[in-house]
Image (cartoon, rainbow, N blue to C red):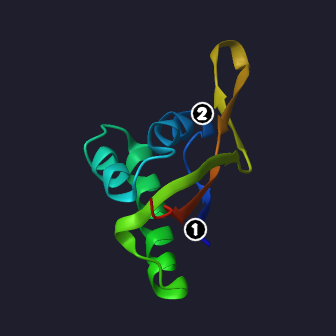
Amino acid sequence: MEARAVARFVRISPRKARQVIDVIRGKDVDEALAILQFMPKKAAYLVSKVVNSAVANAENNFDMDRDRLYVAEAMVDEGPIMKRWRPRARGRADRILKRSSHISIVVRERKEA
């Protein structure tokens, strides 16, 4: 049994979000949230919201035990890219890419040992 949560069109570069996701993959939910709370990155806050949502889905929709939950899968996919222009010298223009991400978290219960 698994519960999932997805945040789509989040305004952060996928590369920056993946740095945070890689740290929490496979960890217990409470440990992952503690790590995210003290990580000095913008993506940590955004990922913690998705983890909390996945935990709430697990508890309310599937009657799972929060103490046995862990982050089974964590992915960041590329969202749409907004293209903007910045004026430069001699009448030229440079392209600015404003990237977005889709953050997906799947939590599962650990088996009884």
Give the labeled residue for mark 1: 5
Instruction: State which tag comes first along the sequence, 2 or 1.
Output: 1
Establish if 4 lies above or below 74.
below
User: Is residue 29 shown left or right of residue 50?
Assistant: left
Residues under labels 2 and 1: Cα distance?
20 Å
Q: Residue furthest top?
A: 90
Quarter where residue 92 is shown: top right
Establish if 26 lies above or below 23.
below
Residue 34, image x, y percentages: 27, 50
Residue 56, image x, y percentages: 44, 77
Quadrant occupied by the N terminus: bottom right
User: Between residues 50 and 11, which one lies in front from this camera angle?
Assistant: 50
The crowd level at tag 1 (other Cα within 10 Å; few <14, some 14-19, many 20+) is many
Give the labeled residue for mark 2: 15
Q: Secondary structure at mark 1?
A: strand
Residue 38, image x, y percentages: 25, 43
Q: Residue at x 63, y 30 (%)?
A: 86
Q: Residue at x 52, y 37 (%)?
A: 22
The amino acid type of the residue labelled 1 equals Ala
The crowd level at tag 2 (other Cα within 10 Å; few <14, some 14-19, many 20+) is few
User: Is residue 41 shown left or right of residue 77?
Assistant: left
